[in-house]
Image: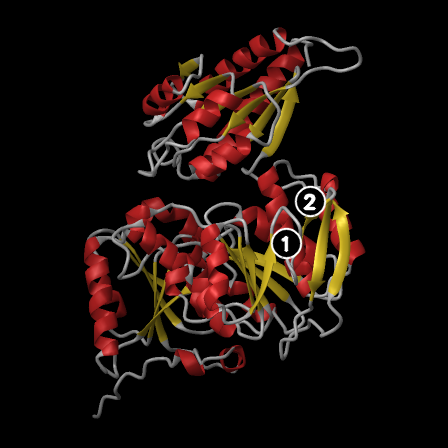
Amino acid sequence: MTVMARRPIDLDALTMDAISAGDLRDRPVTVLGLARSGLALARFFADAGAHVTVYDGRPADDLATAIADLEGRPVRLSLGPDVDPASTWADAELVATSPSITPDFPTTEPRLRAQLRALVDAREGGDATTPALVSEADLFLRLCPSPTVGVTGTKGKTTTASLIAALLGADIAHPVVLGGNIGTPIVERLVELTPRHRVVDELSELQLPTLSRGTTVAAYTNVTSDHLDRHGSLEGYRRVKHRLAELVDPRGALILNLEDPVVASYAGDARARVVGYRRGVPPAGGVGVAEGWIIADGLARLEVAGSIAQSGPAFAGPVMPVDELAIPGRHNVSNALAAVAVALAFGVDVAGIRAAAGAFTGVEHRLETVAVIDGVRFVNDSQGTQPDAVIAALRAFEPPIVLIAGGRDKDIDLSALPPVVAERAVAAVLIGESGPDLGARFRAAGLARTEPARDLPTAIRAADELAHTALAGLPRRAGTAPTATVLLSPAAASFDMFDDYAARGRAFKAAVAELARERAGEGRS
């Protein structure tokens, strides 16, 4: 009996029409990782009729929620540290991965990384039986029939992506899907997408190196420094971030923050039309601010073949007053400019843009006002893990400000932060592994008061007391009541105390809610 040679899946020939016609039916596919992206991949392939094997080095007990979310699909689970990763793709015709699992990141588990490198090298060496390797982010862009907006940057990308989706949604004729690194893998949404949809895809430094396809529009917020543990150097990180600009559809647009020197430099070798934005006089063909208004200067609509965006005259004129933006801070003016540029490029009318932007109040864990209790505003900026993000947060609110900071050190340059903390805050409450170091830095810069706290609830109560002390020293004006701000903006990762920044933010909100209940019971709120 002759055994048929394995026929790896040809990713370049794969389409959603072919998948719908059964092209993946009964074909063995291995998915690496059972976090959010891996779970979405497993469900997508299983629903397409593939024989799916999932590998994850964590034991089944740690993955109970993800396993339950497979909802009974016929997926073979190969879980735990005793499983040889390579054995799970020995007969596979395709290997698909979560974004953090690649042969190129030193943060990938060493054995798995080495075996993936061998797989990639074998395929590049011409082994016709070796399965292709594809990430969830790349698979989505390969198969998506809709115009796409890729959003990236060191900070601000989630707010910007969310605002872009809100502005595009003002055109009700074209449904909008928002996902990607924002926490919603969108590969499972492929079955419902059409050329009339618009997809906003937040893309991180984890996903960008895995891409072989670009987006219709690429929007950048800024590129500073982060995740050097994965990319080795600042230059390596910047090279990864440039990937989206390198891949953007030449018929599309590249939306660039001209106030960020790294991002602005991408205009030099752009393969698509450049639309610049800045918090000053708008550049030709871009968006800016003049006399308190967001203004466009001849921003042309997209003329992409197959796109729902129609060609038409360029728009020049006022869009909306800056003061109508509901999201606080100068940095959010920049984020709004990027979003307005995208919306105008897609032909959304100005009245719709203005209404949607004015109604947008932000996203969870990013300058999110949780409550105001007895004159103290509590702000959840758990996503503020970088010094420039914390600086922007401190400048978004009027003093007095009490900062809650600390967590796991990200091994990045913090030198710019302490002087701004000393200038803008009246005190800081420090938590986590990096708390003592941050406290010492802040005091050396001139901050008069710092306090350690063993956990987040304790920190909130200490910060509340410090805020009330600061309020008591303020002069009272007739008809107005001063407000202090307690700002959680940690300048650190969360992994010493929480699963991720979202868990830290939820814990902050829960502790603030408990404080509000206590004050209500005391009759003081």
Name the one closer to the observer, 30 or 320.
320
- Is disc 1 surrounded by few (<14), some (14 to 19) or many (20+) residues within 10 Å? many
Q: Residue at x 28, y 56 (%)?
A: 105
* Callout 1: SS: helix
* Callout 2: SS: loop
Which amino acid type corresponds to the residue marked 1 in the rendered image? Ala
**Contact (CB < 8 A) between labels 1 and 2?**
no
Q: Sequence-wise, which precedes: disc 1 or disc 2?
A: 1
Mark 1–mark 2 distance (CA, rounded to whole Å): 12 Å
Label of residue 462 in the image: none
Q: Quadrant of the C terminus?
A: top right
Query: Is residue 506 visible to the viewer in this orientation of the structure?
Result: yes
Name the one closer to the observer, 319 or 83.
319
Looking at the image, residue 25 lies above or below residue 295:
below
Closer to the camera: disc 1 or disc 2? 1
Q: x, y percentage for residue 506?
A: 51, 33
Looking at the image, residue 430 lies above or below residue 269:
above
User: Would you name the residue on which mark 2 appears?
Assistant: 360
Which amino acid type corresponds to the residue marked 2 in the rendered image? Phe
> Horizontally, is 288 left or right of 13 in the view?
right
Q: Residue at x 64, y 51 (%)?
A: 337
Looking at the image, residue 361 lies above or below residue 246:
above
Q: x, y percentage for residue 66?
A: 42, 51
User: Would you name the residue on which mark 1 appears?
Assistant: 339
**Image-quadrant location for residue 374:** top right
Q: Quadrant of the N terminus?
A: bottom left
